Image (tube, rainbow, N blue to C red):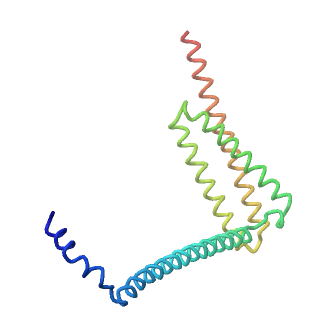
Amino acid sequence: MGNIEKFISENRKAFDNELPPDRIWENITAVFEGEDLLKKRERSLRLRTIISMAAMFVLVCSAAFLLYKARTSNRLDYSQIDPILAKQQVEYASLISEKRDALSNMATKNPQLYQEFTQVIDKMQRNYKQLKTELDQSPNKELTLEAMINNLKMQIEVLNQQLEILNYIHQQENKSSHEQV
């Protein structure tokens, strides 16, 4: 038997007769209540954090929606200026897109020439965008819209000429390859 066991067995009656002071139970109860209070504070802090995050989300979404609405309301509707010109603008823009796609398909055969062609068209596109920004402040919106459409027409003409050049080059290459055979 160890010293501790011997001490406990000799003084067993003294341990059984003594009761812990009432303060100890109060202290133990206070510790558990303090832990409960701490848990309640943590829960309320988590709840506040979640509510704050939800409020920020709503605020950001509202701001994004208002910004979107402001941008879409600032755009000019070309059909209000002149419905015929607006229809032409849409048709020419889609035609340019198609021709640019056709030009890019031929780019693999002659990339140097394609790069030169795209520089010309890109410059015309920048001029078009400049006209588009000027349209908002223009005192004669119809005249500016006509200039935009003329720019689109010129882009189509240039693209047609570029496609013809590429087709001609392609035909010459095919002729020379057939002649070699």
In the image, residue 137 sits, relative to residue 101, either above or below, namely below
In the image, residue 137 sits, relative to residue 174, either above or below, namely below
Residue 170 appears in which quarter of the rendering?
top right
Q: Residue at 86% of width from left, 60% of height from top?
A: 83
Where is residue 123 shown, x and y percent of the image? 58, 53
Kindly give the residue lying farthest to the top in the view shown: 181
User: Left of 116 or right of it: where is 74?
Assistant: right
In the image, residue 37 sits, relative to residue 96, either above or below, namely below
Q: Residue at 47% of width from left, 79% of height from top?
A: 36
Where is residue 177 shown, x and y percent of the image? 56, 16
Q: Depth check: 58 or 49 in front?
A: 49
Where is residue 37 shown, x and y percent of the image? 47, 82
Query: Can you say which quadrant of the picture contains the C terminus?
Result: top right
User: Left of 8 or right of it: where is 31?
Assistant: right
In the image, residue 58 sits, relative to residue 82, either above or below, namely below
Q: Depth check: 33 or 52 in front?
A: 33
Query: Can you say which quadrant of the picture contains the N terminus?
Result: bottom left
Where is residue 3 shown, x and y percent of the image? 13, 69
Q: Residue at 86% of width from left, 57% of height from top?
A: 84
User: Left of 17 or right of it: where is 41?
Assistant: right
Q: Residue at 50% of width from left, 37% of height from top?
A: 112
Kindly give the residue lying farthest to the left in the view shown: 3
Q: Depth check: 22 or 175 in front?
A: 22
**Count of picture labels:** 0
